[in-house]
Image: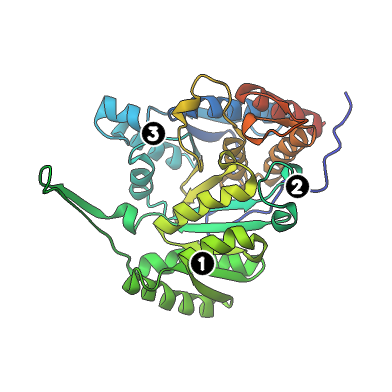
């Protein structure tokens, strides 16, 4: 077997956390909880577990893969709510066993309720552009080359965790939604962001909207000033519309972005344009106690169900992030990312990234090719 020459610009990265997420090297078999999700969720999760199986074949660590119940719309049909007690107990047991959760997409209030239930207050979405995909990205390569951004989103407060009512009948219907932020909630996400900024390039952008939400913006601005001074980094507060514009116009200028729940949701999805496809977006959701859930940034894509067209790489990269951050398995995470890069370098693409001259494969085949490349690289 001929060894694969791994490109020098392979998609690899250092650990995000040093002192926040209780990264640990655990003995024995590692517990991995899986929520397959709905829509294309089972397909991209299956491709990802195929890659994990290949990793085990290389002689590395072994995993006890436990599969939880339905989430999202299916859970609502069966249990009356998108996050059932069954799935809550499943996640709690995985965390108690020092494991982590790999989640496929789930609709409704599932992700918001899960984050609130386990206080997964910190969502980290890496936006790292792959050199192998520069020809597949809609933006000019000179403006996206070497982009490496972390978007930190506050997860358990703000508008997505607010209080809403809907009253009245046709012609007199009235919908209301109220939300808030406390100083503690803002400070703890900004503290993580500032520490990460200090470990990286030292540029922290804090997202606000002065005119639209003045009191909350003042709170974020004041907390940012205090936290940045305490940690010893420089920071800039920018309005969300300006950040959205600059994220596309001058993405290479960004390093760490700290933002509220709603703004972070929109900006991280917008950032997927820099990657070439929304299917490449992924994230980790962390509590201060070390509990973590890893997921893609895309939805269930019901229109792709049964077509074998979904791109599984975002889900595969979320597995790599899980290994690196929750299990301190940096070498194994790098191996997964290098294998994915190599497959792209050979011209293989799912349809969302395909250009003239690329060879198009489906969801299953992409997972298989990454798994095969991983085994060859490891040898």
Sequence-wise first label, 3 or 2: 3
Residue 157 picture location, percent across and down = 34, 58
Q: Marks 1 and 2: CB-CB under 8 Å? A: no
For disc 3, the marked residue is: 90
Residue that sits furthest to the top in the current view: 306
Quarter holding the C terminus?
A: top right
Judged left or right of residue 66, residue 251 is right
Sequence-wise first label, 1 or 2: 2
Determine crowd level at label 3: few under 14, some 14-19, many 20+ residues with C-alpha closer than 10 A.
Answer: many
Q: CA distance from mark 3 to mark 2?
A: 39 Å
Determine crowd level at label 1: few under 14, some 14-19, many 20+ residues with C-alpha closer than 10 A.
Answer: few
Residue 235 picture location, percent across and down = 55, 75
What residue is rendered at 53% in x and 47% in y?
283
**Residue 95's image quarter?**
top left
Looking at the rendered image, the disc whose residue lies closer to the viewer, 3 or 2, is: 2
Residue 49's disc is: none
Judged left or right of residue 367, residue 30 is left
For disc 2, the marked residue is: 131
What residue is rendered at 28% in x and 25% in y?
78
Quarter holding the N terminus?
A: top right
Determine crowd level at label 2: few under 14, some 14-19, many 20+ residues with C-alpha closer than 10 A.
Answer: many
Toward the viewer: 99 or 51?
A: 51
Residue 113 picture location, percent across and down = 33, 44
For disc 1, the marked residue is: 242
Looking at the rendered image, the disc whose residue lies closer to the viewer, 1 or 2, is: 1
**Numbered disc 1: secondary structure:** helix
Residue that sits furthest to the front in the current view: 171
Q: Marks 3 and 2: CB-CB under 8 Å? A: no
**Numbered disc 3: secondary structure:** helix
Color encoding of the figure:
rainbow
Residue 87 showing in the rendered view? yes
Q: Marks 3 and 1: CB-CB under 8 Å? A: no
């Amino acid at each position: 077997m001929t060894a694969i020459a791994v490109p020098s610009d392979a998609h690899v990265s250092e650990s995000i956390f040093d002192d926040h997420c209780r990264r640990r090297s655990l003995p024995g078999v590692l517990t991995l909880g899986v929520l397959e999700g709905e829509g294309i969720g089972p397909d991209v999760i299956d491709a990802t577990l195929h890659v994990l199986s290949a990793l085990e074949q290389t002689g590395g660590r072994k995993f006890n893969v436990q599969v939880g119940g339905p989430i999202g719309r299916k859970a609502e049909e069966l249990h009356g709510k998108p996050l059932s007690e069954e799935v809550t107990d499943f996640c709690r047991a995985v965390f108690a066993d020092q494991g982590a959760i790999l989640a496929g997409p789930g609709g409704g209030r599932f992700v918001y309720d899960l984050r609130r239930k386990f206080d997964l207050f910190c969502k980290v979405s890496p936006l790292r552009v792959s050199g192998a995909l520069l020809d597949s990205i809609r933006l000019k390569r000179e403006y996206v080359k070497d982009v490496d951004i972390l978007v930190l989103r506050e997860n358990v407060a703000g508008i997505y965790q607010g209080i809403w009512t809907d009253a009245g009948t046709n012609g007199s219907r009235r919908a209301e939604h109220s939300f808030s932020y406390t100083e503690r909630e803002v400070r703890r996400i900004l503290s993580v962001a500032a520490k990460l900024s200090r470990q990286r390039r030292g540029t922290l952008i804090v997202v606000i909207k002065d005119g639209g939400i003045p009191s909350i913006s003042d709170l974020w601005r004041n907390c940012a000033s205090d936290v940045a001074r305490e940690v010893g980094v420089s920071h800039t507060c920018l309005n969300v519309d300006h950040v959205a514009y600059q994220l596309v116009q001058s993405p290479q200028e960004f390093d760490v972005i700290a933002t509220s729940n709603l703004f972070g949701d929109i900006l991280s999805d917008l950032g997927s344009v820099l990657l070439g496809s929304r299917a490449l977006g992924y994230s980790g959701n962390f509590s201060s106690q070390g509990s973590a859930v890893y997921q893609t940034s895309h939805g269930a894509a019901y229109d792709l169900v049964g077509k074998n067209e979904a791109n599984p790489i975002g889900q595969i990269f979320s597995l790599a992030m899980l290994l690196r951050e929750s299990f301190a398995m940096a070498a194994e995470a790098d191996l997964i990312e290098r294998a994915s890069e190599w497959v792209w370098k050979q011209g293989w693409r799912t349809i969302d990234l395909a250009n003239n001259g690329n060879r198009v494969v489906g969801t299953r085949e992409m997972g298989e090719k990454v798994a095969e490349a991983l085994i060859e690289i490891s040898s």
